[in-house]
Image (cartoon, helix red, strand yellow):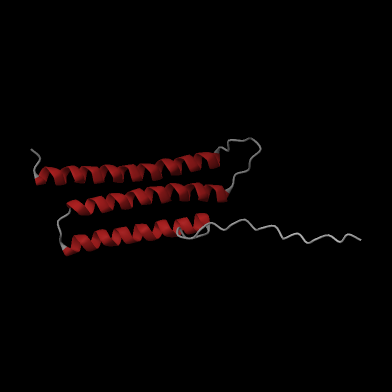
């Protein structure tokens, strides 16, 4: 029979595992982006700082989102002291702000904004039949 203490312990382990996954994603994404920057895959391609920043941003963004999920799960098992709740809330707010700002920088728009439709071609005017 699983006690409440065991249940909390398992949830805490799950939160720690998810945190580790988030950190690994950031580390592996950073290493991969740097590798592609240092050793371009195509012989004729130039090293691009913009591509490096984009790849790094994607890795950090994904890792931060997973870390926020781990923080949310961790709130389930924490003791309900005001200090602990405020600390976790502040961590979630900071990570969420970082994720939002990275996404805006990478995509040029907020997540709730739709992508801009391609510019429509101008309407054709009827040709003169002279």
Question: At 29% from the left edge and 44% from the top edge, which residue is drawn?
Answer: 18
Q: Answer with the quarter of the image where residue 129 lies.
A: bottom right
Using the image as rendered, state which of residue 98 and residue 123 is in the foreground. 123
| Residue 116 percent location from the top left of the image | 57, 58
Q: Position of residue 50 (x, y in %)?
A: 56, 51
Q: Nearer the viewer, residue 19 or 27?
A: 19
Q: Closest to the observer: 47 or 126? A: 126
Above or below, 117 against 7 in this view is: below
Q: Is residue 95 left or right of residue 33?
A: left
Q: Is residue 123 left or right of residue 36?
A: right
What residue occupies the far front of the structure in this picture? 129
On screen, residue 56 versus residue 82, left or right, reads right
Q: Quadrant of the N terminus?
A: top left
24 on left or right of 39: left
Extreme-right residue of the structure: 130
From the top left corner, tell me how far across and down residue 38 is, in percent: 54, 40
Question: Residue at point 48% right, 59% down?
Answer: 104
**Where is 1 relative to 83, above or below?**
above
Residue at 64% over, 35% down? 43
Residue in the image at 46% along x and 48% along y: 58
Q: How many marks?
A: 0
Locate residue 34, reporting x and y percent: 50, 42
Quadrant in which the C terminus appears: bottom right
């Amino acid at each position: 029979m699983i006690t409440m203490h065991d249940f909390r312990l398992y949830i805490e382990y799950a939160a720690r595992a998810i945190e580790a996954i988030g950190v690994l994603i950031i580390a592996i994404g950073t290493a991969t982006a740097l590798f592609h920057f240092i050793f371009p895959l195509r012989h004729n391609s130039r090293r691009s700082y913009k591509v490096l920043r984009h790849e790094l941003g994607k890795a950090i963004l994904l890792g931060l989102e997973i870390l926020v999920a781990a923080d949310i799960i961790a709130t389930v098992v924490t003791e309900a002291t005001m200090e602990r709740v405020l600390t976790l809330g502040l961590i979630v707010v900071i990570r969420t702000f970082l994720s939002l700002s990275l996404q805006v920088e990478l995509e040029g728009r907020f997540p709730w904004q739709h992508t801009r439709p391609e510019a429509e071609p101008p309407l054709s005017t009827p040709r003169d039949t002279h």
